[in-house]
Image (spheres, grey):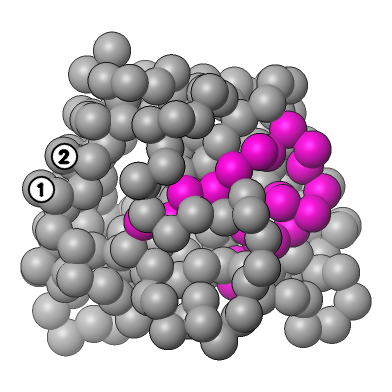
């Protein structure tokens, strides 16, 4: 697996080991929630020699835009399956700066290989507020069975209930068991090119129940990694 250290949220966890690839980016400034082009190019350099064909742990949801760097490596048409409580399709607040809340829109606008996005667990109220009219965006997996393209999976743990994840952002109600059931069904019928996972709590050190928080997030990371290892 590939583990990207952005905030230090993985420091107390033990789901990865010496044989895994650690990418420490904590020295790159200007990366939390928003990422300008200079920082993005530095991040690209850190992952330049690494493959999309793996599971990538991206730290907190504040860094979900890192998915863009892995999607850029795909040189063939593909579809994205997004597990997330938020649609991450907000227009940029200023300029063309990349953000954790708008990276999916940026991928659709700029990556010609991205053909469809299937959203699982997204708050429908947030979608209504955005008023998105894009035939490439699908709420749910109903139409995925007819999709001819291989799949990349992006999994934000804020889609899960607090019993299965503790995140920086407000969370959904999906259980990890149900999410894994969906993932296995996807893997049965589609080629999966790669996967990333985010949704740590970057403020774990100051949480009143930090030990429980770490255990919950680590256990979920272990099960998601097990899915990746056994998907074939």
The residue indicated by pointer 2 is 181
Vertical order, 30 against 219 (above or below): below
Vertical order, 117 against 160 (above or below): above
Specify the quadrant that holds the C terminus: top left
Which residue sits at x=68%, y=38%?
Answer: 114
Crowd tier of the residue under label 2, counting other residues whose Cα lies within 10 Å: few below 14, some 14–19, many 20 or above: few
Residue 202 drawn in magenta: no
Magenta range = 100-120
Crowd tier of the residue under label 1, counting other residues whose Cα lies within 10 Å: few below 14, some 14–19, many 20 or above: few
Which residue sits at x=56%, y=67%?
Answer: 88
Which residue sits at x=87%, y=69%?
Answer: 96
Specify the quadrant that holds the N terminus: top left
The residue indicated by pointer 1 is 177
CB atoms of marks 1 and 2 within 8 Å? yes
The x, y position of residue 36, in whole percent, is 82, 65
Q: Is residue 214 among what the camera can see? A: no
The x, y position of residue 55, in whole percent, is 42, 31
Is residue 85 toward the left or the right of residue 216 in the image? right
């Amino acid at each position: 697996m590939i583990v990207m250290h952005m905030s230090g949220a993985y420091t107390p966890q033990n789901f990865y080991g010496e044989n895994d690839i650690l990418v420490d980016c904590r020295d790159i400034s200007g990366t939390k929630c928003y990422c300008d082009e200079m920082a993005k190019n530095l991040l690209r350099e850190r992952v330049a020699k690494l493959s999309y064909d793996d599971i990538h742990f991206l730290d907190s949801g504040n860094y979900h835009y890192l998915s863009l760097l892995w999607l850029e490596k795909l040189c063939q048409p593909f579809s994205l399956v997004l597990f997330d409580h938020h649609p991450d399709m907000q227009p940029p607040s200023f300029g063309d700066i990349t953000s954790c809340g708008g990276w999916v829109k940026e991928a659709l606008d700029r990556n010609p290989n991205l053909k469809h996005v299937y959203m699982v667990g997204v708050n429908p109220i947030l979608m209504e507020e955005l008023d998105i009219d894009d035939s490439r965006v699908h709420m749910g997996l109903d139409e995925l069975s007819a999709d001819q393209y291989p799949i990349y999976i992006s999994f934000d743990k804020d889609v899960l209930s607090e019993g299965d994840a503790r995140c920086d952002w407000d969370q959904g109600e999906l259980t990890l068991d149900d999410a894994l059931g969906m993932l296995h069904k996807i893997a049965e019928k589609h080629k999966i090119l790669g996967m990333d996972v985010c949704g740590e709590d970057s403020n774990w050190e100051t949480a009143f129940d930090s030990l429980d928080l770490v255990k919950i997030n680590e256990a979920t990371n272990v099960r998601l990694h097990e899915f990746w290892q056994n998907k074939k």
